Image: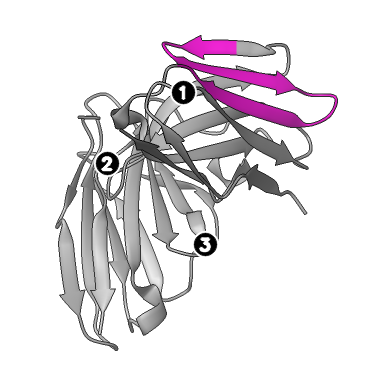
Amino acid sequence: KNQVEQSPQSLIILEGKNCTLQCNYTVSPFSNLRWYKQDTGRGPVSLTIMTFSENTKSNGRYTATLDADTKQSSLHITASQLSDSASYICVVSAGGGADGLTFGKGTHLIIQP
Amino acid sequence: DSGVTQTPKHLITATGQRVTLRCSPRSGDLSVYWYQQSLDQGLQFLIQYYNGEERAKGNILERFSAQQFPDLHSELNLSSLELGDSALYFCASSHATAGGRGETQYFGPGTRLLVL
């Protein structure tokens, strides 16, 4: 069964600090991996999309890495800001249509001043 | 603002009732996707339409149905509502049909449904 596991479930850090969120998956076949940011009560917003051949992708202070051999991805946030407080969701695609997407339950990140 | 609109924002109803959620995709997008998000379940894919036709189906209950109209807006109908149907319902859109092939999906603000 395709699964996406995210850790930690929740994380609290001080403003200005860096943090790394983890995503492990068992989706097969693998097509691409996405990270979304979801503010409380709002729709998810895409941060990065990585295919098999990409192992790093950046979007401002967000950097995602992918190790397709170990089936792991991480999202690194640099110099955190209060606006980074949100849930971060890892989504892995087995290709095909939207029914091939497997969603993680997310990491809830809180940035404290 | 993603360009995807959803109405209503909030909906409170009773068990056994039927409700309709509406979604307008971004201009030019042909695909519409519906998702359910419960507190303990994360995002669950329900169904996808492309240019008026059903294209992919996920964990959608038989009590739920959807359609996409010629102007590309979509409606999700939920009937015989149960307490467990209380959740956030999101609509997303993308230009083409291959939402799982690396194409970005743009999510709407969601409809919060509370079944009492």
* Disc 3 with disc 1 on a shared chain: no
The mark that comes first in sequence, 2 or 3, is: 3
In the rendered view of the protein, which quadrant contains the C terminus of chain A?
top left
Q: In this view, does B106 lie to the left or right of B69?
A: right
Callout 2, which amino acid?
Gly
Asked whether the beta carbons under mark 2 and mark 1 sit within 8 Å of each other, the answer is: no
Q: How crowded is mark 2: few (under 14 residues within 10 Å), some or many (20 or more)?
A: many
Which residue is the site of mark 3?
B41
Residue A86 visible in the shown view: yes
Judged from the image, the secondary structure of the residue bearing numbered disc 1 is loop
Which residue is the site of mark 2?
B108
Residue B31 visible in the shown view: no
Which residue is the site of mark 1?
A17
> Which stretch did the figure color magenta?
A57-78
Q: Say which mark, if any, is on residue B59.
A: none
Callout 3, which amino acid?
Gln
- Percent x, y of residue B20: 22, 65
- Indicate which label's residue lies in the foreground, 3 or 1: 1
- Percent x, y of residue B39: 43, 63
